[in-house]
């Protein structure tokens, strides 16, 4: 429930800011949209980080698993909860704003290669920060909330006009499914996972011994 509620808040507030910005003629602004994404992630981390770890992102759940900080048996249930929350957020936005076509769906503004590369790098930064400011896969604290929320806002501010700065398969999945814009969803389902996995390697290179150790994994994890 914590993952579903947190992902619901992320999609409802973040993509909702995009919808309101479109319908109001730019009243929210790109900066405002970026801050909305960062703020909702930060507040939800502080709210439920000690309950579920506040992943709200399938790429993060997979990254924590590969980094040996999260049991494999929980990956699919977490992803299911995140997908449900994302769909619920987009469905509510559809009810509130039936005239908006895309519901904040992520779309490449440039080439597919450009957007794929941006999504990989931005998610690398996000996962690297998450691994660096958390212990295990659970965290509740102002430092983690600010660092992770700030990274999300930074990525949205920098990469949003080109790739949409999803960094999160669930964030892209909800609006795409509800709006019916599925043709390029594959990009936003795969690139963030690649970036998160690369960040695990980055963590192993920069943190203490035993951090994100891929060797000697016990069975079933």
Image (cartoon, rainbow, N blue to C red):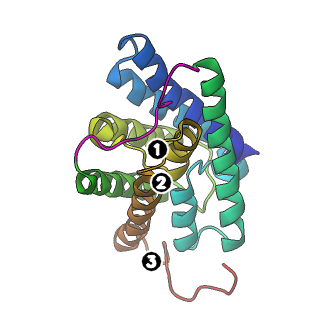
Residue drawn 25% across and 57% down?
113
Q: Is residue 148 left or right of residue 73?
A: left
Which x, y percent locates residue 10?
57, 36
Q: Secondary structure at mark 2?
A: helix
Which x, y percent locates residue 144?
51, 45
Cβ atoms at labels 1 and 2 below 8 Å apart: yes
Query: How many numbered tags mark residues here?
Result: 3
Q: Nearer the viewer, mark 3 or mark 1?
A: 1
Q: Would you call the spot at circle 3 few (<14 residues within 10 Å), some (14-19), or many (20 or more)?
A: few
Image quadrant where one finds the C terminus:
bottom right
Residue 195, picture quadrant: bottom left
- Residue beneath disc 1: 148
Q: Main secondary structure of the magenta part?
A: loop
Mark toward the start of the polypeptide (1 vs 2): 2
Q: Which residues are magenta?
A: 98-110
- Residue beneath disc 2: 130
Q: Nearer the viewer, mark 2 or mark 3?
A: 2
Which x, y percent locates residue 206?
35, 68
Image quadrant where one finds the N terminus:
top right
Residue drawn 72% across and 60% down?
77
- Residue beneath disc 3: 209
Residue 108 colored magenta?
yes
Vertical order, 62 against 176 (above or below)? below
Residue drawn 57% across and 44% down?
177
Q: CA distance from mark 1 to mark 2?
A: 6 Å
Q: Secondary structure at mark 3?
A: loop
Cβ atoms at labels 2 and 3 below 8 Å apart: no
């Amino acid at each position: 429930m914590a993952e579903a509620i947190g992902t619901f808040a992320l999609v409802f507030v973040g993509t909702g800011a995009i919808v309101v910005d479109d319908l109001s003629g730019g009243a929210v602004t790109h900066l405002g949209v970026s801050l909305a994404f960062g703020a909702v992630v930060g507040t939800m981390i502080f709210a439920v980080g000690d309950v579920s770890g506040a992943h709200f992102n399938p790429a993060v759940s997979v990254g924590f698993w590969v980094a040996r900080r999260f049991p494999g048996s929980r990956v699919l249930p977490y992803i299911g909860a995140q997908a449900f929350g994302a769909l619920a957020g987009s469905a509510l936005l559809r009810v509130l704003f039936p005239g908006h076509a895309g519901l904040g769906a992520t779309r490449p503004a440039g080439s597919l290669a450009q957007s794929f590369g941006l999504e990989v790098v931005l998610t690398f930064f996000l996962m690297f920060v998450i691994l660096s400011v958390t212990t295990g896969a659970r965290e509740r604290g102002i430092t983690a909330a600010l660092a992770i929320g700030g990274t999300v806002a930074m990525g949205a501010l920098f990469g949003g006009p080109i790739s949409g700065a999803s960094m999160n398969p669930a964030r892209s999945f909800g609006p795409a499914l509800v709006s019916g814009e599925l043709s390029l969803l594959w990009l936003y389902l795969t690139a963030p996972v690649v970036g998160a996995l690369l960040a695990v390697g980055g963590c192993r290179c920069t943190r203490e011994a035993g951090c994100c150790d891929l060797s000697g994994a016990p069975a079933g994890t």
